[in-house]
Image: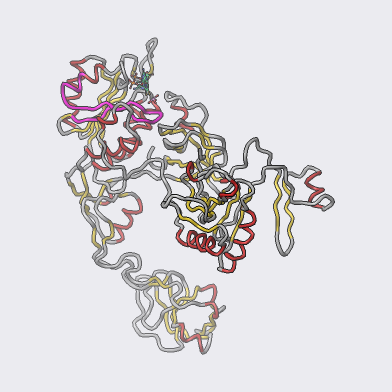
Amino acid sequence: MTALFTNPLPIPVLGFCAYSGTGKTTLLKQLIPLLNQRGIRLAVIKHAHHNFDVDIPGKDSFEMRKAGARQVLVASHVRWALMTEDLVDDDPQLQHLLSQIDADKVDIVLVEGFKKLALPKIELHRAAHHKPLIHIHDDNIVAIACCDDTTVDDSLTRLDLNNVAQIADFVQHYQQAWQPTAVKLPIDFTETLQTAASDAQSGLTVSQGIAEVLAQITPLERIESLNLIDIDNRVLAHDIISSVNVPQQTNSAMDGYAFALNDLATSATLKVVGEVLAGHHYPDILRPGEAVRIMTGATVPQGADTIQARELVSEHDSIITILESEQVVKGQHVRLAGEDIAKGDVALAAGSRLSAAELGLLASLGFNQLPLFQRPVVAVFSTGDEVSQPGQALKPNCIYDSNRYTIISMAKKLGCQVIDLGIIEDNEQILTATLRSAAEQADVVISSGGVSVGNADYIKTALANVGNTQFWRINMRPGRPLAVGNIDRSLFFGLPGNPVAVMVAFLQFVQPAIRKLAGESHWQPQFIPAIAQHPLRSKTGRTEFLRGIYTIGSDGKIHVSTTGAQGSGMLSSMVSANCLIVIDDDTATIPAGESVFIQPFADLL
Ligand SMILES: Nc1nc2c(c(=O)[nH]1)N[C@H]1C(S)=C(S)[C@@H](COP(=O)(O)OP(=O)(O)OC[C@H]3O[C@@H](n4cnc5c(N)ncnc54)[C@H](O)[C@@H]3O)O[C@H]1N2
Ligand code: MOO
């Protein structure tokens, strides 16, 4: 009977619910000053069932609103009030109302009304009114404030409706003990292994599917050594320990003057006794009242602890005056030896993927040859009588093979070595031979097509001849059918035929598998919250991956809209998208303006 509610604020929200006439407002009027005395800053949201007004006819703000202004903000040095005309069919949305509250200014929001929402509430009950108890049908009641003659289940905190101080104690404790609930991502990467068989009928969730896939993988242990210049997107096989400090010497981050800050206490003028360029050092220790001219990257002389940039110094005849000397902070523009990486630190851990920043860092430590996991070898083929080779004339009723190209490109992006096996005709002997030879050459074999009911026969029988594979139904769209298994020591993925389903299934299942196989430690995709530009629809019981375009709105926040039609054969939707919008299996609709998680393609595609 309660409707879903998510608290959008970083502060607690506590409701008060009761049948009318129980005295909610009377209690709140007594409770608020008591809580204020205890230093708790409050906001109150009150639900009104009728057409209320807070303004008075004749006041300028009232007249302007009546003249047609949809929002009127009236402000003085004491308070401001924003009045918004917002005619909605049903009850106003509490989540939307809460997002109007300034969470920096209050410690808790008390809500009067919104009885049907699943927000934590205190029930107020007077036995004399002979109304039913609310908590019997509402698990969100955290306490009941009632009179002596009410019988209450022991499991519920009982408060005395006539003892406001006791209710204030409860609210105070609730506010102090409240913790925001951890953000629930649409895919749970901590999911533990379930038996696929037991869920085969109802299908696996995406999280279960990922857990099942990862459980089948042992990282490859083949290690090779390569020079920095030849390393591209490879995974480090051992921890790299720094044998030097970076930077090696304490040096200047500015062209300017180095001196001891203490000297400025007596005078803003100092005597320049030398100059030090990058790659050199000043041979003496600075004495009181002395400074050296110093260039960016040059070693800071002993005795100096602070740098002032050249633009903030005037120099005449080797005497400098430090301008704005009162703003100089000890240690400014000084880069300490080892502040980036200290000698003996793990500079990069085994399992790190090496791209531009990591390669630069390894170079900065003086490393050249590095131990790397060998690249996983991936063999890819397409199946289907209608699937034709691009570059050749398209036969009637056929389509060009696009899946092999998207799969090969994504596998290469993950640093794999790819064997292209082309299009394999729907023939059991040929498919069996292809799978056998693919498994001899590759760590991972990927096919597309032929995994849904009915179409799967050849792939299924060919697989049964050479390995063991499970056919799963993943509760997601697109990408519902998925085959995963082993052929000898190789991993097999049978991706669905629809081109968008191929890409989505690759990103969700094949990608983590290849990353784990390649020895990479951090393979989880990033989820970023974005504001839905328009209502988004899904179905509970399955995870929806919509193709989305995210942009930064004029409010500085990330907004996302879909690319339009979402057919799982429409590759153009992937081309115009820059992210997947991921709607979890508990959610059917996301209203416009609400938050939704996206997976940016970033460097994945
Ligand atoms: N009765 C049912 N029918 C279907 C179901 C189902 O559960 N029950 N699932 C649907 C879903 S979801 C998908 S996805 C597809 C998956 O089918 P298959 O993996 O068997 O793939 P095919 O039938 O061979 O092809 C589907 C579609 O994709 C095109 N295709 C295939 N290969 C390629 C390629 N290399 N490049 C481009 N396009 C390709 C093919 O022409 C079909 O249009 O099954 C649904 N049906
Ligand atoms: O896997 Mo399918 O239609 O969901 O593309």
| Residue 107, horizontal then vertical, whole percent | 54, 60
Residue at image x 34%, y 17%? 388
- 320 to 211, vertically: above or below: below
Return the residue nearer the eye: 47 or 73.
Answer: 47
| Residue 542, horizontal then vertical, whole percent | 40, 32
Residue at image x 18%, y 27%? 468
- 573 to 247, vertically: above or below: above
Left of 211 or right of it: where is 265?
right
Q: Is residue 202 visible?
A: yes
Left of 429 or right of it: where is 95?
right
Q: Is residue 554 visible?
A: no
Please identify the quarter of the rendering in which residue 196 is found: top left
Magenta residues span 461-486
Which quarter of the rendered image does ligand 1 occupy? top left
Q: Is residue 445 magenta?
A: no
Q: Is residue 482 magenta?
A: yes
- 481 to 414, vertically: above or below: above
